[in-house]
Amino acid sequence: MKKIIVFGATGNIGAYFVDYCNSNLNKKEFEIVAVGRKNTDFFKKNSIEYIQCDITNKSDFNLLPADNVYAIVNFTGILPAYIHEFNPNLYVNTNIVGSINILEYARKIKADRVLYTQTWAVQSAYWGKTEILSPTMPKNYLYTGDHAFYTITKDMIEESMKFYYQEYGIGAFVFRLPNVYLYNPNKSYYVDGIEKKIGYRYMIDEASKGHDIEMWGNPNSFKDVLYVKDLCQMMYKSMFVNKKIGVYNAGTGIRTSLKNQIEGIIEVFSPNLKSKIIERPDKSNYNSFVMDITNAKEELGYEPKYFYKEYLNDYKKEMTLKRFDELWMK
């Protein structure tokens, strides 16, 4: 039976991806193996094999399957959103050394392909200058801010995957991710070392209480709102296409305005209390953007299913079910 190894399976996106694969794989042909740093029996309870592994420790890879590994999915990484102070060694050890160890594992066991989640910040120099971000646009990123060094480390692995593809024939699929929306019980993150509440989580909480919600800046500014389950679909389909390399900007290709975002949150999370929107044009908000997903549609057969209202309703369901809380609670 062919194996699909998912590194970073205990993380936000990784847990959803393992669940997606477990629901969609042909169990007679494929089996999923979840890999992560945490000591947990969460996956065992769901009849999924789990192996605890520190990717920065080469000897830990001896614990992993050595035969019949078809695909490897790499969700690992240290993100600036989860650390309160700049630590370049932490980025290097996990994002570079750890991911190179994964690529070496793929080479030694002759995996067919590797999937890798990259940051959309490799195109950060375009933010505010162009609204449509295409995967065919040359990488062009900023060297300042809390994402700069993180982006450098992530980019090294994207480039390294090209080497492993050309030198060893290992398939290389790279997915550039904007903010990926998903339910998680933890509601804060770090920006330049300062802990802040996640914006959409704050608005959901306020709407649930019937409180007024401030709308900062231009109500017509927009973003491409990507729900985790659409990302899972895109990545899942890349495992079975008859090609060996591709770079994809993950998204829906749909512009959702700030006004529509807040109105949707009020409709779904404040149906009876009906929060009011307070316009604050004096406050700044984000640069508008939408992802060009043309090649994901044409090459992978990807079709987003969770447009804005569908995402909110499914998010509300996941928030009620709390399926992954034991993995993520601090």
Image (cartoon, helix red, strand yellow):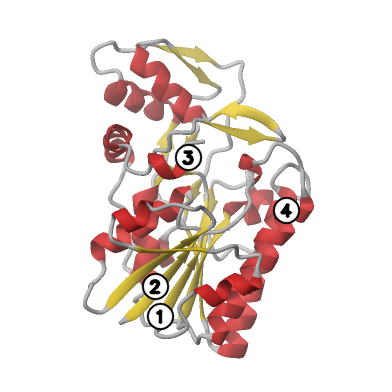
Question: Which comes before the other along the chain, label 4 or label 3?
Answer: 4
Residue designated by label 3: 223
Residue 4, disc:
2
Q: Secondary structure at mark 4?
A: helix
Residue designated by label 4: 90
Q: Are marks 1 and 2 in contact (CB under 8 Å)?
A: yes
Cα distance between the residues tagged 1 and 3: 35 Å
Question: Which comes before the other along the chain, label 2 or label 3?
Answer: 2
Question: Which comes before the other along the chain, label 1 or label 3?
Answer: 1
Residue 224 appears in the picture as rendered: no
Residue 266 x/y as whole percent:
33, 21
Q: In the rendered view, tell whether residue 30 sits above or below residue 286.
A: below
Residue 136 x/y as whole percent:
55, 66
- Bin the neighbour count of mark 4 within 10 Å (Cα to Cα): few under 14, some 14-19, many 20 and up: some
Q: Secondary structure at mark 1?
A: strand
Residue 4 x/y as whole percent:
39, 73
Q: Nearer the viewer, residue 54 or 203?
A: 54
Q: Are marks 4 and 1 in contact (CB under 8 Å)?
A: no
Q: In the rendered view, tell whether residue 256 sits above or below residue 252.
A: above
Q: In the rendered view, tell whether residue 96 sits above or below residue 273.
A: below
Q: Who's the residue at 53% across and 88% down the image?
A: 169
Residue 191 appears in the picture as rendered: yes
Residue designated by label 1: 70
Quarter of the picture holding the N terminus: bottom left
